[in-house]
């Protein structure tokens, strides 16, 4: 069962990122309808897009950074048959914190909330990594 939870967490992270791409497409479509920015420059310069588009785009970039490490770690846990209840709870915490970070980032973008949530996700990832290291040591 623990391996299924780990796989579900990876799938949720992938689906969340894909949902952000859809949200980005919708935001860009709205921005094109409203106008007010250099559409030709937007093809090569993200800074000309309206703020909401930039926030979503920046968050997608965030979703492709540390989650890549999470995927590598989760797959390593699965391949080595080290997935257990503790790693499953940590994976749930990691993905939940990434989703919370994302919601804050694309809505209020309050760094005073976003940064601690980001740090929590990294600490969970670090704990999962150190734990696996000692499991295979």
Image: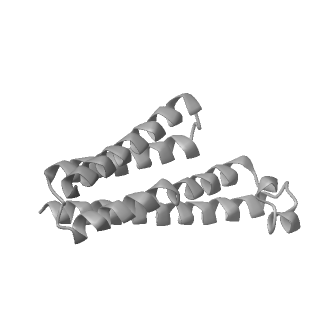
**In the image, 72: left or right of 112?**
left
Residue at 64%, 49% in the rendered image: 55
Hey, which quadrant is residue 112 in on the image?
Answer: top right
Q: Quadrant of the N terminus?
A: bottom left
Residue 91 visible to the viewer: yes
Hey, which quadrant is residue 32 in on the image?
Answer: bottom right
Q: As drawn, which residue projects farthest toward the left?
A: 1
Q: Residue 81 versus residue 41: which sits nearer the camera?
A: 81
Expressed as whole percent of the image width and height from the top left, the position of residue 131 reads 25, 48
**In the image, 36: left or right of 62?**
right
Q: As drawn, which residue projects farthest toward the front?
A: 137
Residue 96 visible to the viewer: no
Residue at 33%, 51% in the rendered image: 129
Expressed as whole percent of the image width and height from the top left, the position of residue 107 reads 56, 42
Q: Quadrant of the C terminus?
A: bottom left
Q: As drawn, which residue projects farthest toward the top?
A: 112
Expressed as whole percent of the image width and height from the top left, the position of residue 75 reads 31, 67
């Amino acid at each position: 069962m623990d391996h299924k939870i780990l796989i579900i967490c990876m799938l949720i992270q992938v689906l969340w990122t894909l949902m952000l791409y859809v949200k980005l497409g919708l935001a860009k479509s709205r921005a094109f309808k409203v106008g007010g920015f250099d559409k030709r420059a937007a093809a090569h310069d993200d800074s000309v897009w309206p703020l909401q588009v930039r926030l979503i785009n920046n968050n997608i970039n965030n979703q492709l950074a540390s989650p890549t490490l999470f995927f590598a770690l989760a797959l390593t846990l699965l391949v080595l048959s080290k997935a257990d209840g503790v790693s499953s709870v940590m994976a749930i915490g990691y993905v939940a914190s990434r989703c919370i970070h994302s919601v804050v980032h694309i809505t209020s973008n309050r760094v005073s909330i976003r940064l601690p949530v980001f740090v929590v996700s990294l600490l969970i990832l670090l704990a999962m990594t150190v734990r696996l290291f000692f499991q295979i040591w």
